[in-house]
Amino acid sequence: MAHTIRDKEKLIARVRRIKGQIEGIERALAAEAPCGEVLRQVASVRGAMNGLTSELFDDHLRAHVLEAASDADREQGAQELMGIVRTYLK
């Protein structure tokens, strides 16, 4: 996936921020933080994961479907994306 290589540093930075948020949830639970606070942190992580997922879906669609080199590559990119979306929606 050339688009993940091209945007590697940006994507890794997003993943590291998400990792920090998850570690914050762990610290909140260990410190017996109020459930509302923990739930807000979980919601923030979910939003961050959804944003990352959306960006990757968009990049995949552009690189492997819209800008595919051939009809066969386009079909393969579309089939791959449909399988991933099915898994994501489960």
Image (spheres, helix red, strand yellow):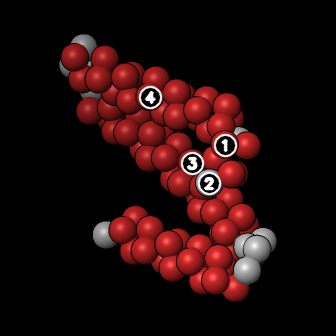
**What label sits on residue 5 in the rendered view?**
1
Please report whichever mark, 3 or 1, sits nearer to the chain's N-terminal start: 1
Specify whether 57 is left or right of 45: right
Amino acid on which the number 4 mark rests in the picture: Lys
Circles 3 and 4: CB atoms closer than 8 Å: no
Q: Dot 1 lies on which element? A: helix
Please report whichever mark, 3 or 4, sits nearer to the chain's N-terminal start: 4
Q: Which residue is mark 3?
A: 52
Amino acid on which the number 3 mark rests in the picture: Leu
Q: Which residue is mark 4?
A: 19
Quadrant in the rendering for residue 30: top left
Q: Is residue 61 above or below residue 10?
A: below
Q: Nearer the viewer, mark 3 or mark 1?
A: 1
Crowd tier of the residue under label 2, counting other residues whose Cα lies within 10 Å: few below 14, some 14–19, many 20 or above: few
Q: Dot 3 lies on which element? A: helix
Please report whichever mark, 1 or 4, sits nearer to the chain's N-terminal start: 1
Q: What is the distance, in whole Å, between disc 3 and disc 4 at their CAs?
A: 12 Å
Crowd tier of the residue under label 1, counting other residues whose Cα lies within 10 Å: few below 14, some 14–19, many 20 or above: few
**What label sits on residue 1 in the rendered view?**
2
Q: Residue at x 61, y 29 (%)?
A: 13
Q: Residue at x 53, y 54 (%)?
A: 53
Q: Give the camera-side residue of 37 and 50.
A: 50
**What is the x, y in percent for residue 35?**
26, 33
Quadrant in the rendering for residue 22: top left
Crowd tier of the residue under label 4, counting other residues whose Cα lies within 10 Å: few below 14, some 14–19, many 20 or above: few
Amino acid on which the number 2 mark rests in the picture: Met
**What is the x, y in percent for residue 40?**
41, 37
Circles 2 and 1: CB atoms closer than 8 Å: yes
